[in-house]
Amino acid sequence: MNQPAVLPTSLPTILTHRRTIVVVGAGLIGLTTAILLARDGHRVTVLDGDPTLPPATPEEAWVGWRRPGVNQFRQPHLMLPRWTAEMARELPDLLTRLISDGAAQVNTLHLQPERVTHGWRPGDEAFDTVTARRPVLEASLSRLASTQPGLTLRRGVRVTGLVADAGTGWPIPDVRGVTTAQGTVAADLVIDAGGRRTPVPGWLRRLGGPDPALTREPCGFVYYSRHYRASDGHLPTGHGPALSHHPSWSTLTLPSDGGTYCIVLVTSAKDRALRALREEAAWEAAARTSPVAAPWLQHGIPITVVSPIAGLEDVRRDYVRDGRPVVTGLVAVGDASAATNPSLGRGAAIGAIQAVALRDVLAAAPTDASALALAYADATTTRVTPWVDASLRFDRHRLGEIDSDILGLPYIPQDPTWAMTTALLNGATGDPVLARTSARVAGLLTTPREALSDPQVGPRLGVWMGGPRYPGDGPTRDDLLREVAAATATDTFLHVEVEGRSPRGLADDGQEPVSVST
């Protein structure tokens, strides 16, 4: 893979209005936003309730760093090509630091075999990415933030509420800072980077302000993940895309740093027959049935037990309702603004796009608080919302398809674009043009609407329309259930006979994984 170009760090923009900014939350998007704004000349303070600092080495970060405020801290992550492209343009020194810390440099298209890609073609460098486990990513970003002029990172400071004045023009709060256990921190602008379960809307409610417009729906998926270390230190690429689909379930095979990787089995929360996947033997039996996951399973040794996560929701919060802000002096980024299905891996890339949009809006320096809120809402609608909408639409269809598979019924939605989407996914297994088109959609480089309207794509989809939804030699649902049942019966016997095995349900570092809602 070609190393991403490392460009010189841009000098701060000469701003008419330098702001004092507080960012609530020091996760990936909170720190990314803070660095971008500090480099643009703002005075930025990041407050995070978790007290511990990141360890010095990547492996220490994985083993020893505790982030109880981040539920998915040791869950799988993949940084998409769009995220890497944004960082290459905006924070190239972060990519340099990540590569130095052992992050994997991979090409997401060429995770697939050559019979699919037909070899390297000009332009394939667009699918390059740099990726690592979440603790390693966040530790690298945290160290970069700690050296950034104009940025103060305060850990162990729990934010408890907002400070606000009455707004002008209509009765909305005008946020002027935050309250903490150590006192008040004043700000011209507060940025909510508190994640999908952010407490900020509750704080706003305590001020008497109206709620943001909320769109919420259960994503309905359960994720069973396990991390591995490659036996030979090399990642097992060339077997299939990072996300592949089978009847009633999907698999994720995610490269990571230092020769590690993660395999994830994705099911419906309604699928009682597959709840046994939380057990190691059943999980391995299922993974072995997947022609994409099986080679990854055999290539390394596990470094964690199976860790399930579920009960997540697709959430979107809009702080402008009916053309008017519900609050001024406060904006949200990342999952605090819009949280999507983790299996598509789009959260970090969407958050980075939004962070850049906020930086650009502030650089335009609207002098009126309401004008700033409206300008940011417009930028979010233009740059971010299309990706969120596409992700939510895919979630609904894929979950509907899985639930139909469980019942043995065809999935026939009213939305005609799903037939084209499935034709594209199927065609990507045998047509090099469609493989690249599908990879561009998966990498967040082009929207599905743009991809399907490409005049080079439409004619190629025809031969795949109406064909079997799951082409190839993948397992049927009966195959999967038979293997899981056999492994579960064997594992139950062994669990009685063998003493000293690790307690089920505990992660490798002793932390409880996120519980599965059933």
Image (tube, rainbow, N blue to C red):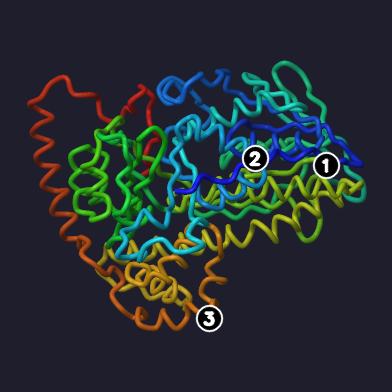
Marks 1 and 2, how far apart at CA = 15 Å
Q: Are marks 1 and 2 in contact (CB under 8 Å)?
A: no
Quarter of the image for residue 173 reads top right
Q: Which residue is mark 2?
A: 91
**Can residue 160 be seen at all in this image of the molecule?**
no
Identify the mark nearer the N-term, 1 or 2.
Answer: 1
Identify the mark nearer the N-term, 2 or 3.
Answer: 2
Q: In the picture provided, is 379 more to the left or to the right than 188?
A: left
Badge 3 marks a residue whose secondary structure is loop
Residue 100 higher or lower than 402, as above or below: above
The spot of residue 321 in percent (x, y) is 75, 57
What's under tag 2, amino acid-wise?
A: Leu
What residue is drawn where x is 70% and y is 55%?
380
Q: Are marks 3 and 1 in contact (CB under 8 Å)?
A: no
Q: In the picture provided, is 259 more to the left or to the right than 122?
A: left
What's under tag 1, amino acid-wise?
A: Thr
The spot of residue 23 in percent (x, y) is 71, 33
Marks 3 and 1, how far apart at CA = 40 Å
